[in-house]
Image: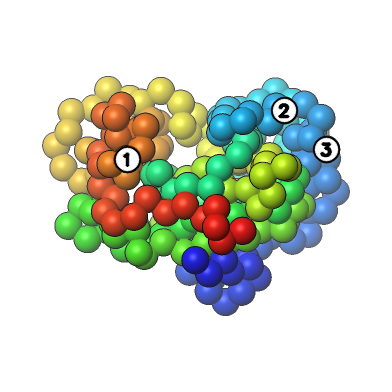
Amino acid sequence: MTIYPVTAPEFAPYGRVITGYEAECAAITAALTSSTPLPEGTGYVPEDPALQSLPEAAVLGVSLYGGMPVQFGWCNGHNTKLNCLEYHRDSEFNLGTEDFILLLAREDDIVDGKLDTAKVKAFKAPAGTLVEVYATTLHYAPCHTDPAKGFKVMVALPKGTNTDKPALAVRGGDDAYLWACNKWLLAHPESVEAGQGAMAALTGENIDIANDL
């Protein structure tokens, strides 16, 4: 699988690199390094006090979301597989202590409620680079570039995202994909999430980039 850099033109439909916040990003990556774990698998915390309490995070949050309440959490660990794709009604911002890879598709790649994983593309973000992933971009857990190092990635989103799923009767629209607050999920049939009841809406191969690293 071709792995494009986030600076390549191929990334433009999916997101962009954000510059100008080097001091804030340095403080956040330092806290990620020193205060968050590195699981053997993949771990996710929507909001972490070690990040949330940083003055630099407060400054960055205002710029990223224009004054909306923001949560700073993390997704850390080791991963090379797609498994699922999710989207939110807002952009997500990522920042890694190490290089990491995002497996991405677009919301308009969903056809008749399904998404063919052949539409998925891979993009590598360098360590310390702040990346915006657009609301119309489907994404999930990052992938590592070096299994010895894994990944530690900040995840900034509007406050409450990825917390408990609201009570909702499935009537139409995207209701069947709702998996948590502000989180719509398309699972591959082979994934743990599909076994837990997530909509198995990904067709084709459950992509694994282990041999492409």
The three-letter amino acid code for the residue at tag 1 is: Glu
- Nearer the observer, disc 1 or disc 2? 1
- Secondary structure under the numbered disc 2 in the rendered image: loop
**Residue 185 as seen in the image, left or right of residue 7:** left
- How many numbered marks does the figure carry? 3
- Secondary structure under the numbered disc 3 in the rendered image: helix
**What crowding class fits label 2: few (fewer than 14 Cα within 10 Å), some (14-19), or many (20 or more)?**
some
Marks 1 and 2, the one that precedes in the sequence: 2
Measured from the top left, where is residue 6 in percent x and y? Answer: 62, 65
Residue 30 is marked as 3
Query: Can residue 87 be seen at all in this image of the molecule?
Result: no
What residue is rendered at 69% in x and 49% in y? 146
**Residue 75 as seen in the image, left or right of residue 174:** right
Q: Nearer the viewer, residue 178 or 197?
A: 197
Measured from the top left, where is residue 80 in percent x and y? Answer: 53, 48
Marks 2 and 3, the one that precedes in the sequence: 3
The three-letter amino acid code for the residue at tag 2 is: Thr
> In the picture, residue 198 is in which quadrant?
top left
Write down the residue under mark 1: 190
Query: Is 131 situated above or below 171?
Result: below
Query: Is 164 situated above or below 109?
Result: above
Query: Can residue 195 be seen at all in this image of the molecule?
Result: yes
> In the picture, residue 35 is in which quadrant?
top right
Whether tag 1 and tag 3 are in contact, CB under 8 A, the answer is no
Marks 1 and 3, the one that precedes in the sequence: 3
- Secondary structure under the numbered disc 1 in the rendered image: loop
